[in-house]
Image (cartoon, grey):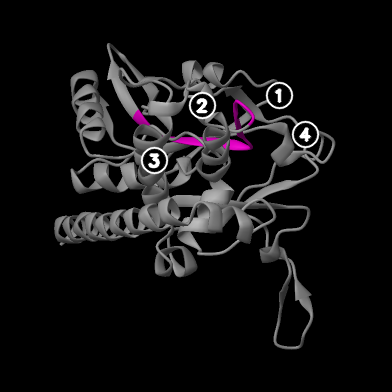
Amino acid sequence: MTPRKASIIDLNTANTLFVEIINSGIPFGYQQANCHNISHYISLLLESKGYICAKIWAFAPVVYSTNSSRLISFVDKKNLSPNGAIDWGYHVAPVLQVRIGDKVRKMVIDPGLFPKGPVRYRTWLAKLKTRKLIYLIMDSEWYLYNSSMIPNSQLLADSNGFLNINPPNIKLPDWFSDKLITDFFKYEDDALNQHWIEKGLAVNETTDIFYTTEIQPILHSNLHQDLVNDYKMLVGNVFNFETVFRDNNWNYEMNDDFQFKHLEIIAKYREIYFSNLSKWKESLLILNEIIKKNSL
């Protein structure tokens, strides 16, 4: 799918925007999750400067096929993940249309994978090193998607209680896909009201701080390996981090015993998380005010 709204810019402008994105404070260091939140924040940042980007979505077979468990997977060089790997079902990043000579190239902004500058989208896809990867290039307004055998939007009851078929906004060919990567939705309703972007950025920033402050100094210490393993389980697994710090909840790994054992550090970083959350709420509010003012 070709983006309809993305601005066409020159290479110097693209490089300048990349540097501004790097310097914006966006937490790129934690790669376990929240690429969709980072991408959408970047799209708003660019829009506040008068530019519209697109987004490229890459899907591993596990997302679109019931017959595969294959993920986008690579070695965690920071040694933060409990299993030593970064695993994604999908990945997404902003795309700029860049004029180079007499051609317009689709260039991806993904400082987590390419910290030196924008790269061509096929270079970005190759970096993911996943067989049978599929991709879509879409307008930036699409924030996230649902994936299921039958999307909810296709089962809407009319006033008489009969189900109407509502075609999804994306449908992959049946010959290779038996799941539906569909129902792409905008940043509104629950996502907007519950601050999903701000929470995602706060998660990534807080885990970055935790890693640098608490894990990295003892990562290779033989005396502290039990503590390192606990910390990896706590913050190297994003679902555990969100359960404990964002949701103040528990699961089978983050049970009462584990949380009581690490009570002090959990309390410390829960406070840091909510401080970061407030900061990102303010940042997003400012961006939206600039965008609104520019549209008048």
Q: Which residue is mark 3?
A: 210
Q: Which residues are magenta?
A: 83-96
- On the rendered structure, is 191 left or right of 104? right
Of labels 1 and 3, earlier in sequence is 1
Q: Position of residue 110 (x, y in %)?
A: 39, 28
Q: Which mark is residue 69?
A: 4
Give the main secondary structure of the magenta stretch: strand
Q: Secondary structure at mark 2?
A: helix
**Quadrant in which residue 87 is drawn:** top right
Q: Farthest residue to the front: give it.
A: 223
Q: Nearer the viewer, mark 2 or mark 4?
A: 2
Q: Position of residue 17 (x, y in %)?
A: 22, 30
Q: CA distance from mark 2 to mark 4?
A: 37 Å
- Amino acid tagged 2: Leu
Of labels 1 and 2, earlier in sequence is 1
User: Neighbour class for label 3 at 10 Å: few (<14), some, many (≥20)?
Assistant: some
- Amino acid tagged 3: Phe
Q: CA distance from mark 4 to mark 3?
A: 31 Å
Q: Is residue 33 magenta?
A: no
